[in-house]
C-alpha cells in the first residue's frame, strides 16, 4: 500500500491530530517523504467529504468545508432530540443512585447501556469520573447543571427518594438471599 | 474385529461421531455407509461413560434409525413404512448438512487468522449542556417507577416429590411375560368360521389339534358348542 493510503488509514483510526514528526517516525521515512505523501493524499481527497487539514507541525482528517451545513444539522439534531424511554430510565437510575458504575447500572436495568451513556455524556447530563476505589472503573454521575435544571440541590431532594433507595436496596441484596435459602 | 476406538477430549454429539465414523472409512454419506458403521456406532454408544442425559434421546433416535438401515441392508425385501423412510432420509440430510458446515468452518478458520478491519478510536467529545425539552422531576420519578417495576422478583419454586414410576426394564419384562403367556386366540377368529367354507373350518380344526399334540398350545372350551380359546403356554419342549 502506498504511503498516502497508509497515512490515511492511520489518521482515520487515530481520530485525532498527529505530528508530522510522529508520522515520520512511525513509517520510518524522512519528513520530505511524509510531506510528499500528504500532498498526494490532499490531492486525492479533493471533492470528498473528508479533508486533510495541516499546519506546520500537525495534520488531521476532518470533515470537508462543503459538508459543514450537513454536519451542523446533525449536531443540532443530536443535541436537541427528545430522549427515548430507555435513556430517561437510565438517567433516572443515575440520578437516584447519585452516580453508578456501568456494571451497577446494567445490573439494575438488565440491558447494555453503552450507547445511552454516550448520549447522556455528550449532552452534558452526566459526567464520567474514575471510581475512587478502583481507577480502572468509571462512575457516571449526574451533572450539577442537571440538578440546577431540575431545581434540586442534592439527590436526596428527588421525589420519593427514600422509598426508591430502599426498594433498590432490597433488589441489590437479593442474590445473597437466594443462595442462603437454597443451600 | 474393528480396531475402532474413540478418544474424544470432550463429549461429541451423536451426529459428529457418526460423521467421524463415515469419514474415517472414506465413505460418502449414504445408506450403505451408514449400515456399515452401525455396529461401530452402537459400540460407541453402549461404552460411553458420563452419558449426558440430554443427549440420550438423540442417541436413541439415531441408533434406532441405524438399526432400521442395517436391517434393510441385510433384508432388501424388508418393506419400510413411509415414516421409517422419512427418518432415514432425515438422518442422511442432517449428516450431509453437518459435512457441509464442517468443510465451511475450515475456510472460516483461515479468515479469522488473516487481516481485520479497525474502527476509529473513541473520540473525546466536548460536552455541551443540551437537555431535552420535557425533562422534569415528575417525569424522572415516573421513569424510576418503571425501572423498579421491571426488576426481577425472587420466585420460590414449588417443591413437589416426583413419584416413582416403573422403570423401563421392569416394563419390558412385564410385557415379555404377558406376550409369551397371553397369546391367545379364539378358534372362531383363527378359522374365520363365519366366512370360510366348511372344509376350511375342518382343516383349521385339525391344525389346532396338531398344535395341541405338539404341546405348543392349550385349548379351552368354556361351554358345550361354545368357542374354543387357544393359548400358548410357556413355549417349552413339545410333548408327544
Image: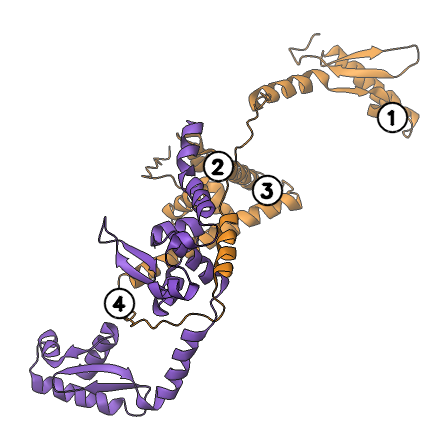
Chain colours: A purple, B orange
Residue for badge 2: B54
Q: Looking at the image, which residue is at 86% across and 22% down?
A: B188
Label pair 3/1, CB-CB below 8 angstroms: no
To the question of a shared chain for discs 1 and 4, the answer is: yes
Q: Give coordinates of residue A50: x percent, y percent.
A: 30, 85
Circle on res. B200: 1
Q: Residue at x 29, y 71 (%)?
A: B125
Disc 2 secondary structure class: helix
Question: In the picture, which quadrant includes the C terminus of chain A?
Answer: top left
**Neighbours of disc 1 within 10 Å: few (<14), some (14-19), many (20+):** some
Kindly report the distance in space between the C-alpha atoms of the residues bearing marks 3 and 1: 34 Å
The residue singled out by tag 4 in the image is: B115
Position of B129 with respect to B87 (left or right) is: left
Q: Using the image, name the chain to which the residue with label 4 belongs.
A: B
Q: How many marks?
A: 4
**Residue that lies at the very extreme toward the left in this rendered image:** A30
Tags 1 and 4 touching, CB below 8 Å: no
- Tell me which chain the residue with mark 1 is part of: B
Q: CA distance from mark 1 to mark 2?
A: 56 Å
Residue B160 lies, in percent from the top left, at: 57, 26
> From where the camera sits, is residue B13 visible?
no
- Residue occupied by mark 3: B76
Nearer the N terminus, badge 1 or badge 4? 4
Residue A75 in the image: above or below residue A152: below
Amino acid at each position: 500500500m502506498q504511503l498516502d493510503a497508509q497515512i490515511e488509514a492511520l489518521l482515520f483510526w487515530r481520530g485525532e491530530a498527529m505530528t508530522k514528526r510522529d508520522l515520520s517516525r512511525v513509517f520510518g521515512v524522512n519528513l520530505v517523504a511524509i510531506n510528499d505523501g500528504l500532498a498526494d493524499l490532499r490531492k486525492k481527497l479533493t471533492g470528498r467529504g473528508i479533508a486533510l487539514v495541516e499546519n506546520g507541525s500537525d495534520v488531521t482528517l476532518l470533515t470537508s468545508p462543503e459538508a459543514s451545513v450537513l454536519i451542523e444539522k446533525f449536531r443540532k439534531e443530536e443535541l436537541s432530540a427528545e430522549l427515548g424511554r430507555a435513556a430517561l430510565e437510565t438517567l433516572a437510575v443515575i440520578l437516584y443512585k447519585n452516580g453508578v458504575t456501568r456494571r451497577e447500572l446494567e445490573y439494575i436495568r438488565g440491558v447494555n447501556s453503552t450507547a445511552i451513556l454516550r448520549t447522556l455524556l455528550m449532552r452534558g447530563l452526566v459526567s464520567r469520573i474514575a471510581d475512587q476505589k478502583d481507577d480502572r472503573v468509571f462512575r457516571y454521575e449526574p451533572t450539577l447543571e442537571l440538578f440546577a435544571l431540575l431545581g434540586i440541590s442534592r439527590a436526596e431532594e428527588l421525589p420519593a427518594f427514600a422509598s426508591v433507595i430502599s426498594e433498590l436496596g432490597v433488589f441489590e441484596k437479593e442474590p445473597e438471599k437466594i443462595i442462603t435459602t437454597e443451600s | 474385529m474393528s480396531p475402532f476406538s474413540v478418544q474424544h477430549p470432550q463429549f461429541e454429539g451423536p451426529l459428529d461421531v457418526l460423521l467421524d465414523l463415515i469419514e474415517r472409512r472414506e465413505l460418502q454419506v449414504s445408506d450403505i455407509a451408514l449400515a456399515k458403521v452401525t455396529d461401530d456406532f452402537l459400540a460407541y454408544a453402549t461404552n460411553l461413560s458420563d452419558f449426558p442425559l440430554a443427549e440420550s434421546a438423540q442417541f436413541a433416535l439415531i441408533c434406532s434409525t441405524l438399526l432400521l438401515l442395517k436391517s434393510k441392508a441385510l433384508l432388501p425385501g424388508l418393506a419400510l413404512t413411509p415414516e421409517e423412510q422419512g427418518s432415514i432420509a432425515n438422518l442422511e440430510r442432517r449428516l450431509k448438512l453437518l459435512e457441509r458446515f464442517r468443510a465451511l468452518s475450515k475456510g472460516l478458520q483461515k479468515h479469522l487468522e488473516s487481516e481485520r478491519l479497525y474502527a476509529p478510536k473513541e473520540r473525546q467529545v466536548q460536552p455541551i449542556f443540551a437537555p431535552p425539552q420535557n425533562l422534569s422531576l415528575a417525569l424522572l420519578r415516573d421513569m424510576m417507577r418503571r425501572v423498579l417495576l421491571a426488576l426481577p422478583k425472587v420466585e420460590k419454586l414449588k417443591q413437589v416429590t416426583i413419584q416413582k414410576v416403573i422403570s423401563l426394564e421392569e416394563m419390558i419384562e412385564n410385557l415379555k411375560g404377558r406376550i409369551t403367556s397371553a397369546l391367545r386366540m379364539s378358534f372362531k377368529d383363527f378359522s374365520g368360521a363365519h366366512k370360510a367354507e366348511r372344509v376350511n373350518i375342518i382343516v383349521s380344526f385339525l391344525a389346532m389339534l396338531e398344535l395341541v399334540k405338539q404341546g405348543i398350545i392349550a385349548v379351552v372350551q368354556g361351554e358345550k358348542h361354545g368357542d374354543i380359546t387357544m393359548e400358548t403356554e410357556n413355549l417349552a419342549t413339545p410333548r408327544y
